[in-house]
Image: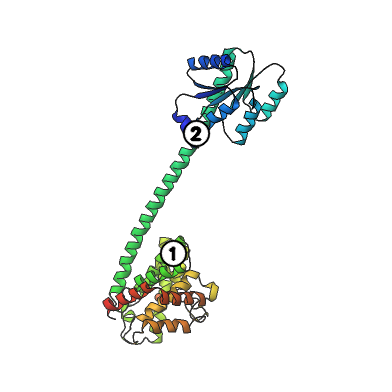
Amino acid sequence: MEIAMNIIDNKIDTILVIDDEKDIRTAIKDYLELRGYRVITAKDAIEATKLLDREVFSLIISDICLQGMSGLDLLHLIKEKEIDIPLILMTGYGDMEKVMDAFKNGAYDFITKPFDMNEMFISVKNAVDKQRLKWENIQYRLHLEEMVKKRTTQLKIAYKNLEDMFLGTVRIVINTLEASDRYTKGHSERVRQYSIKLAKKLGLTSQEIRNLEIGSILHDIGKIGIDKTILHKNGPLNNDEYAIIKTHPSVGKHILEPIEFDEKIINIIYQHHERYDGQGYPSGLKRDDIFFLARLVTVVDAFDAMMSTRPYRNQLLAEKAIIEIDKNLGTQFDPEIGKNFIKLFNTDHSTMDILKHYNKDGKF
Ligand SMILES: [Fe+2]
């Protein structure tokens, strides 16, 4: 690839002429240089291979009968090294068998000695022009690939910026929603932070984490549609009120339908109150039938909810909330996700930092 670039950058094509007879080398060199080519000569294939290692040639013209390594050997070597340079062989009469062999091995053309320089020039010009066209095609393809790559990166960045802007707006909406209730202030943001930590611990992909980030922030968006007197009620909820609260996953799904979100994000919102044992709502889904990221948010959501004090429920210490999660593994929570969350809580002190911050500022 690099070679292609170099050749195209060079305006003058360089030709390597190999012949053990100095007069022939010089005659070809003089003739071709007069016609605008740069010509380098070598007396044998050994010298030629050294030149091939350090120069880029558009064409090789070589005598078929050289001392030591023959022109045919050189052709084999070029093929072996995958050097993409056309080779014209100069042959004597009676070398037809060698010529056939040379063609089989990829020789571009042959000229029979003694030859007319003008005839040789036709072959040389064709070979060099063809080679240049080949390099230009490669360069064009590379340029195209580079352009596509560049544009794809630009599009990805633009999409990510758009998504970030959207996420920023969503966070404002959620913060506004939660700010009106001192018991849930900052809840979705904390669920987002814990969920991402847990997702990283579980080795989820960046796309899954992105979906989780949006889904966890939006998981309670449906509460927008719930009567505020029920949502902020001081005291336990009666059955009817609880039934209304339980509609928030469906309301959330309904609110987001016009945005045409990824179905995975919708599933997080719609299924975050399902239970592993099938006793949850709204659909009573069980085990693996519940979307994995929704099962993850269920654990984190419940943990943060236990940490916040409702007027009718005392705030649990983080350790007690963890014991509750442990007790409900396999019933309310996916056991594997729950265990990993507990492990994260016990080993990652920054999780505790989020809690400290929350307790200090929230004063719930
Ligand atoms: Fe919820």
- Residue 98 visible (yes or no): yes
State the residue in front, 52 or 320: 52
- For discs 1 and 2, the disc positioned in front in the rendered view: 2
Residue bearing mark 2: 4
Instruction: Check residue 169 in the rendering and tell me which mark sits there, or answer none.
Output: none
- Disc 1 marks a residue whose amino acid type is Ile
106 lies left or right of 156:
right
Label at residue 209: 1
Q: Nearer the viewer, residue 219 or 15?
A: 15
Q: Position of residue 71 (x, y in %)?
A: 64, 25
* Quarter of the view holding residue 118: top right
Marks 1 & 2, CB-CB < 8 Å contact: no
Residue 312, above or below 304: below
Report the quarter where the C terminus lies: bottom left
- Pick the residue in front: 67 or 297: 67
Q: Tell me how many marks there are.
A: 2
Question: Secondary structure under badge 1?
Answer: helix
Observer-nearest of 244 and 275? 275
In the image, is residue 34 above or below residue 294? above
Q: CA distance from mark 1 to mark 2?
A: 42 Å
SS assignment at label 2: helix
Q: Position of residue 173 (x, y in %)?
A: 31, 67
